Image (cartoon, grey):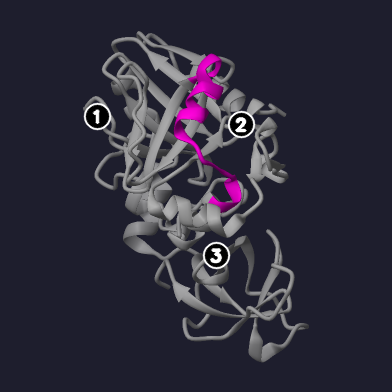
């Protein structure tokens, strides 16, 4: 576990689970969510893995391995992509940008070693070099609308949700002071859930395919082949339907405790002893919407059915159509 120096900032409360090592919040969760929504503050994501790829073949080589079309990726254009198993299950989620000389990507904490091992095994005769840059670079998220400036030599992923900045670790604390106020990862998670954006390790398990989570829209290019797992992607897209689908849940606000990751989801009509139709993947208290969650349920679960997330009543919004 990598412990961020920004945990020494006033009010910092350490996060747990996959985000251990950075701050969950700095004392006021809803204020921090409002700050992000208004385009102010920053989120310390320095626990995430950072991987770089250099060499003149880097984009054409990555194009053969990833679900996304990156062969002609323009400099400074952000994208995201997946690496699948041979059976089409999601193994890695990568958030990329190329600066014209280096492809930068950040990944879930602790997954960079396995990713690098796979990339190294696929180099063959290509003119590429891969590196784990986690020790020298940290990721900081700036929300959409932020007016914080960054040095031109830093790699930046600019998306509709904000900017992911690859900050030299030696300059992390100085940049944080410039970008203040600090915002914890719980606030960012609440906005991620609101936006229905999946996260590896939370919305995924060992058998998740991209179709179940809506990742076809942002991380998979359906007109390219030549990557591991592509046959499954094409077969399900053209001939079938995924066995599960992602839904957004509005939870009963009278409950004190949020259902955690893995909590069973049942049809309310079947009661708390009914057979589960899915499970909660992520949950949060949102500053406007109240308690919300994402869940993965069986495809044939009625879209208008009231659900129980553990013992909490929940209405659902469709994210992935049945």
- Crowding near pointer 1: few (<14 within 10 Å), some, many (20+)? some
* Quadrant placement of the C terminus: bottom left
Asked if 310 appears above or below 218 in the picture, the reply is below
Residue 1 in sight from this viewpoint = yes
Horizontal side, residue 52 vs residue 150: left or right: right
- Residue 286's label in the rendered image is 3
Residue located at (35% from left, 8% from top):
127
Find out whether residue 179 is within the magenta segment. yes
First in sequence, mark 3 or 2: give its number: 2
- Residue 73's label in the rendered image is 1
- Closer to us: 285 or 110: 285
Horizontal side, residue 85 vs residue 152: left or right: right
How far apart marks 3 and 1 lie (CA) works out to 35 Å
Q: Position of residue 94 (x, y in %)?
A: 45, 35
> Is label 3 in contact with label 2 (beta carbons under 8 Å)?
no
* Quadrant placement of the N terminus: top right
Q: Secondary structure at mark 2?
A: loop
Magenta extent: 168-187
Residue labelled with disc 2:
47
Asked if 183 appears above or below 316 in the picture, the reply is above
- Closer to us: 177 or 168: 177
């Amino acid at each position: 576990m990598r412990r961020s120096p920004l945990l020494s900032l006033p009010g910092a409360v350490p996060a747990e689970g996959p985000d251990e090592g950075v701050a969950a919040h700095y004392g006021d969760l809803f204020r921090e969510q409002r700050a992000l929504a208004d385009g102010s503050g920053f989120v310390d994501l320095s626990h995430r893995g950072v991987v770089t790829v250099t060499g003149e073949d880097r984009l054409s080589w990555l194009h053969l391995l990833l679900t996304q079309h990156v062969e002609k990726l323009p400099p400074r254009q952000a994208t995201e992509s997946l690496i699948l198993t041979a059976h089409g299950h999601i193994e890695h989620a990568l958030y990329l940008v190329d600066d014209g000389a280096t492809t930068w990507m950040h990944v879930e904490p602790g997954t960079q070693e396995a990713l690098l091992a796979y990339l190294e095994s696929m180099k063959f005769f290509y003119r590429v070099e891969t590196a784990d840059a986690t020790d020298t670079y940290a990721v900081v998220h700036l929300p959409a609308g932020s007016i914080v400036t960054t040095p031109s030599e830093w790699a930046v992923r600019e998306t509709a949700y904000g900017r992911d900045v690859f900050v030299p670790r030696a300059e992390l604390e100085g940049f944080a002071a410039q970008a203040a106020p600090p915002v914890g990862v719980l606030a960012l998670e609440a906005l991620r859930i609101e936006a229905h954006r999946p996260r590896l390790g939370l919305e995924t398990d060992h058998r998740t395919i991209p179709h179940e989570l809506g990742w076809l829209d942002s991380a998979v290019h359906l007109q390219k082949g030549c990557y591991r797992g592509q046959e499954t992607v094409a077969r399900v897209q053209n001939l079938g339907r995924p066995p599960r689908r992602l839904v957004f849940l509005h939870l009963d606000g009278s409950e004190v405790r949020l259902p955690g990751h893995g909590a069973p989801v049942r049809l309310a009509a079947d009661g708390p002893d009914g057979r589960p139709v899915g499970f909660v993947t992520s949950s949060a208290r949102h500053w406007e919407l109240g308690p919300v969650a994402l869940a993965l349920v069986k495809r044939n679960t009625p879209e208008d059915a009231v659900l129980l997330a553990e013992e909490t009543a929940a209405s659902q919004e469709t994210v992935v159509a049945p």
